[in-house]
Amino acid sequence: MAMAAQPASPTSPHKIPAGDGPYARAKHFQLVEKDLDASIAWFWKAISTGDKVDSALKDMAVVMKQRGYLTEAIDAIRSLRHLCPKQSQESLDNILLDLYKASGRTKEEIELLKQKLRKIYLGEAFHGKTTKRARSHGRKIHVSIKQETSRLLGNLAWAYMQQRNFMAAEVVYRKAHMIDPDANRACNLALCLIEETRFADAELVLADVLAGRYQARDQQDGKIVRKVEELLARIMAQTWPGGGGADGRRRRDEVGSGSESDDDDWVENQMLALLDVAVPYRKKSSRRLPVFEEISPVVYKEQMAC
C-alpha cells in the first residue's frame, strides 16, 4: 500500500512524497526514521531507476555531507549531474561549493566560484533575468544579480585568504566593495592589508568602518567594533618600535596612481584577469544586463560602444 504524503515533523516545511517509490522511501528514512545510511541507499536506487533523479542526487549529497562522506558526495555529483536538467545545475554547483569548503578542497572551490562569476561577468547568469528564486531557511526569496555577485565575491576572497593569497583576496574584496559595501568584508580587507604589511592602508579601511561608512549588519551587538579593535591592536603590535613591521605605505607601483577612479580601474582589470576574461571583453551580441553598468563598468561601457 502506497504511503500517503506526510510532514516530516511539526516544524518542518518539507513533506515526504506520497507513494512507495525509491525516492519516497529515501525521504522517509531521512526525515522520519532518521536512518541516514538507509536513506543514502534508497537515494542511489532512486537515481538508478530514474525516480526524481535531480532531487535524489541533491538530497543524497546533503545526507552524505551530514554523515561525513564528503569525497563520495563530490564524486556522486560530478559523475551523475549530467542526468539532471539544466535548471538543477546551479543548485548542484552550490552543494559542490559547500562540499569543497567542508573538505578543505580550496583550489576546486576557487575554480568553481570563478566559473560562476565568469558567467555573471559575461551576462550568462540567471537565464537573462535580473533576479532568481532561491530558498533561505525554508523560505522562498528573490535574489538579485547584485546580491549574488556580492555573495560569490565574498566567498572567493575568503577562499583566497585560506590559501594565504592575500593580494588576490584584496582585489576581490575591493571589487565586492564597489558593488555592496559591507563592514565585515571591510574588516577582512584590512586583514589582507595587514598580512601584506600595508598597515597604513589597513588603518584607513578600519577608520572608515568606525565612521559608519560601510553597512554593518552586526553593529548592534558590537561584533564589528570588537573586530576593528582587535585588528588595530595587531597593527599597533607590529608597527611599534622594535616590532619589525614595514612602514605600511601603499605600493602604488602595484596599485596604480592615487585617484579613486584609477583604483577602481585597477581593481576592475585585476578582477577580470583573475577570472580569465579578456580586457576589454567584446562580442557583437551582448546579453549583459543593465546592472553590470554598476558591477563591471569598464567592460560594460566598452561593449556599449561597439
Image (cartoon, rainbow, N blue to C red):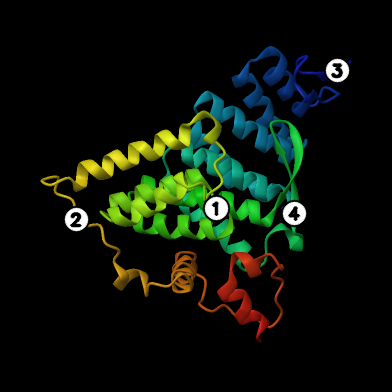
Residue contact at pointers 3 and 1, CB within 8 angstroms = no
Q: Earlier in the sequence, mark 4 or mark 2?
A: 4
The three-letter amino acid code for the residue at tag 4 is Thr
| Residue for badge 2 | 246
Task: Using the image, tell me which numbered label, if any, was put on residue 181.
Answer: 1
Give the class, few, some or many, for how many residues have Cα within 10 Å of label 4's Cα (few <14, many ≥20).
some
Q: State left or right for residue 56 relative to residue 70.
A: right
Q: Earlier in the sequence, mark 3 or mark 1?
A: 3
Q: Earlier in the sequence, mark 2 or mark 1?
A: 1
Q: Earlier in the sequence, mark 1 or mark 4?
A: 4
Q: What whole-number distance in Å separates the C-alpha atoms at marks 3 and 1?
A: 50 Å
Who is closer to the viewer here, 258 or 61? 258
Residue contact at pointers 4 and 3, CB within 8 angstroms = no
The three-letter amino acid code for the residue at tag 3 is Met
Residue shown at the point (47%, 65%) measured from the top left: 271
| Residue for badge 3 | 3
Residue contact at pointers 1 and 4, CB within 8 angstroms = no
In what quadrant of the picture does the N terminus appear?
top right
Task: Using the image, tell me which numbered label, if any, was put on residue 131.
Answer: 4
Kindly report which numbered mark, 4 or 3, lies closer to the viewer in this rendering: 4
Residue 253 makes an appearance in the image:
yes
Give the class, few, some or many, for how many residues have Cα within 10 Å of label 1's Cα (few <14, many ≥20).
some
